[in-house]
Image: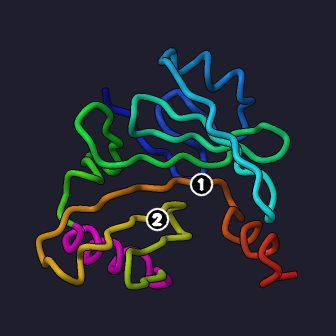
Amino acid sequence: MEFTFYPYEGFGPVKFLMSRDEVRKIMGLPYEDVTMTTDRGSSIRDFFAEQLFIGYNNDFKCNRFELCKGYDIDIIFEGESILRRPYKELLEHYQKLDPEIYIDREGFTSLKYGFSIWCPDYYYEEDAMPETLLGFVPHYYDDCLREMGLMK
């Protein structure tokens, strides 16, 4: 199963800010509710097909998705699979397209394109493949920083 990623809009038929019920219906796949409450608030998510998490804000509106590498579901962006390309290739490509890309030891985030790639093995294996793709709504990171008290 393949879905096309649309920056800051969603992926495949799932659009950001759809209700949880709409997302569940449109996905048409079995899901597991993995909502958790921590001291920082609720983490509301549904888990589909053992590799796709769809997250929701406190109003139960879709605000992110996270795809872990696997073989059942794939996300296509710019005509290519994101998780089936070597991390080094992805990093070099998006560094050219997004001069403000944020790179840390475990991956990178492009606010221009609205996604993060996680690849913790990259510093140990030059040919490492990415582990996870996180797509998100505008200001998702701002909201996370506010919740942690790091931004007003």
Mark 2 in CB contact with mark 1 (< 8 angstroms)? yes
| Left/right of residue 25 with respect to residue 151 in the rendered view | left
* The N terminus lies in quadrant: top left
Q: Is residue 59 left or right of residue 77?
A: right
Residue 84, image x, y percentages: 20, 51
Asked if 71 appears above or below 109 in the picture, the reply is above
* Residue found at x 48% / y 18%: 29
Q: Is residue 4 above or below residue 13?
A: below
Amino acid type for the residue under numbered disc 2: Ser
Task: Inspect the magenta stretch and tell me whether residue 2 lies in it.
Answer: no
Query: Residue at 32% across / 34% down in the picture?
Result: 73
Residue bearing mark 2: 116
Q: What kind of secondary structure does the magenta stretch mostly adopt? A: helix
The answer to which quarter of the image holds residue 97 is bottom left
The image's colour scheme reads: rainbow
Give the answer, above or below, for where 67 lies relative to 18: below
Mark on residue 136?
1
Q: Is 97 in the magenta? A: yes
**Residue 64 point in image, percent of width and height:** 60, 49
Question: Which image quarter: residue 40?
Answer: bottom right
Q: Earlier in the sequence, mark 2 or mark 1?
A: 2
Residue type at mark 1 is Phe
The boundaries of the magenta stretch are 87-101
